[in-house]
Amino acid sequence: MPKIVDKVSKRKEIARFAMELFAQNGFDRTAIREITARAGMGKGTFYDYFVNKEDILSEVVQLMFIEWTELIISKLKGVKDPLMQLETLLKEGAKLGDEFKHLMILYVDIWRRSVRKKGSKKFNRRFQSFLLESKKVVADIIEKAKAQGMIRKAVDSDVIATTLIALVDGLCLHYMVLKPEIDIDGICQTFFDTLLQGMKEK
């Protein structure tokens, strides 16, 4: 009886091998034959699961951001206060590079491809979807703070959420390049305190 393969699980397994290679060498410098060699499969078998290298990149993006989201959720576990949630998101997000250092080259590659519109439609949609979902999570936390009277009702949740997500990305890269010289906790605390003062009732 032929072995039954769970195609979804196998796609993820191959994507994990690809993710390691993309992180080490960059997307453009990784060949499909290197992925298949790492996954212990023939090159022909690769096409049973993926259309091309761009197709596997979109799967890698999905896996990568699921991992990042799970990590952030674990950091927020037990934090009920919306403002504390925002502060935790900022501080922990800025240090994501510590736990995902091996993926930062790939993350920069993903941004570069997306900005240049070089990726497939599927890849671009997945990346945009992640950014929009991240923004929505932060905007929802801000809305809770507004509902609880912690900040002004007039605060534009989408604008603040977009700014915080962009800040986290930038700080994460700065922290990786400049640490230990950069005081990331101090920077996050100062920014958050200043932001909070601007959002509170005057």
Image (cartoon, helix red, strand yellow):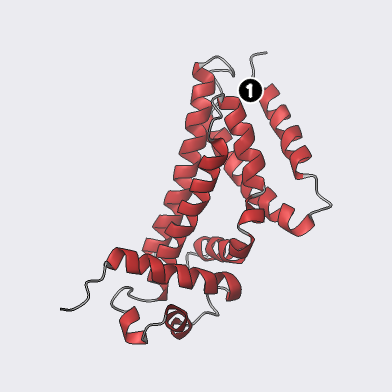
Please tell me whether residue 171 is drawn above or below residue 76 in the rendered image. below
Between 12 and 123, the residue placed more toward the observer is 12
- Pick out the residue farthest to the left: 1
Tell me what residue is drawn at x 54 percent, y 30 percent: 78
Q: Quadrant of the N terminus?
A: bottom left
Tell me what residue is drawn at x 51 percent, y 41 percent: 73
Quadrant assignment, res 154: top right
Please tell me whether residue 172 is drawn above or below residue 101 in the rendered image. above
Quickly name the residue at label 1.
Answer: 199
Where residue 6 appears, as percent x and y from the top left, is: 27, 66
Q: Secondary structure at mark 1?
A: helix
Tell me what residue is drawn at x 63 percent, y 23 percent: 199
Q: Quadrant of the C terminus?
A: top right
Q: Residues within 10 Å of mark 1 (few under 14, many from 20)?
A: some
- Pick out the residue farthest to the front: 1
Quadrant assignment, res 160: top right
Please indicate whether residue 125 sits to the left or right of residue 74 in the image: left
Between 116 and 144, the residue placed more toward the observer is 144
Please tell me whether residue 44 is drawn above or below residue 121 in the rendered image. below
Tell me what residue is drawn at x 76 percent, y 33 percent: 190
Where residue 51 appears, as percent x and y from the top left, is: 32, 75
Where residue 61 appears, as percent x and y from the top left, is: 46, 60
Check disc 1 and give the amino acid type.
Answer: Met
Please tell me whether residue 90 is drawn above or below residue 182 in the rendered image. above
